[in-house]
Image (cartoon, rainbow, N blue to C red):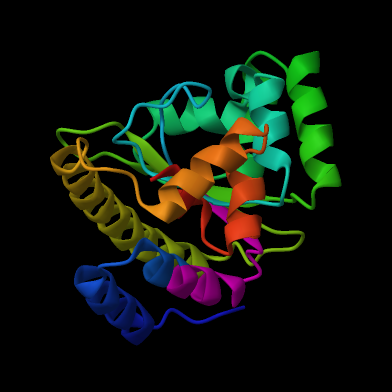
Amino acid sequence: MADFDIRVIQEFADESLRATKQDDIVEKFRKESRQFGFNYFVALSLCDLANPPDDVVWIDQAPKGWDQIYIKNDFQSVDPYFEAAVKQRLPFIWSDRLDQVKRSKGVAQPTHDMLDEAATFGYGDGISIPMLIPGTHRGCVSLTGENPDLSEAPRHTIHLMAIYLFEACLRINKSALRDWKAKEFIALTDREKHTLQLLGTGLNASDISEVLKVSEPTVRY
């Protein structure tokens, strides 16, 4: 069982406030969260993921291919954790949320299918931290692993770091979006042209990020 260490949170908060590149703070969060057994995480604006607006936060550190399956099968509409993140204000453990669903209305077959599919990608229990930020979309940071430490100290540590992560990503995204709008009439760079060419071949953001050796958020930008 990990101990609550305010120094870790203070260091992460300081770095997040200084961060100018999304990849840097995402990597820092990934490193810290793995100490608690969280192998995967996502930071998302809670919107229609199949048709997201330009100003969303979308940090995808899930297993490769899961996002495509999730969207293709419209798992968003049957995901009990997504539903809870939209309605709740405080962090919740996935297994606790699933127990609530079982007691209230039972788990529908499509939800069972989603959970079974997720398990094949290495998803175990997890935690979701809803984000309520005035003036923008509701958001959520969710973390999972095969055997994560969900005791009190890690939950509080992850909760506070997730707030700073989401705020930093939102700030950096807004800055990038302003820059993009300012140069929308400027000719594309060679890298941007290459990205469009790869997109035209049918590759998705995940595939293109591997080809170009950059992050998925960079590809989307």
The residue sitting at 32% across, 54% down in the picture is 169
The residue sitting at 74% across, 51% down in the picture is 124
The residue sitting at 21% across, 42% down in the picture is 186
Residue 127, position as x, y percentages in the image: 55, 50
Residue 172, position as x, y percentages in the image: 25, 55
- Residue 129 appears in view: no
Region in magenta? 27-42
Q: Is residue 35 magenta?
A: yes
Quarter of the image with the N terminus is: bottom right
Q: Is residue 47 magenta?
A: no
Q: Is residue 2 left or right of residue 165?
A: right
Residue 59, position as x, y percentages in the image: 47, 50
In the foreground, 77 or 156: 77
Residue 17, position as x, y percentages in the image: 20, 70
Quarter of the image with the C terminus is: top left
Vertical side of 53 occupied by 105: above or below: above
In the foreground, 49 or 37: 49
Rendered image quadrant of residue 120: top right
Vertical side of 80 occupied by 141: above or below: below
Vertical side of 103 occupied by 158: above or below: below
In the foreground, 217 or 142: 217
Q: Is residue 114 left or right of residue 87?
A: right
Q: Is residue 218 left or right of residue 78?
A: left
Rendered image quadrant of residue 157: bottom left
In the foreground, 204 or 12: 204
Rendered image quadrant of residue 191: bottom left
- Residue 89 appears in view: yes
The residue sitting at 63% across, 26% down in the picture is 71
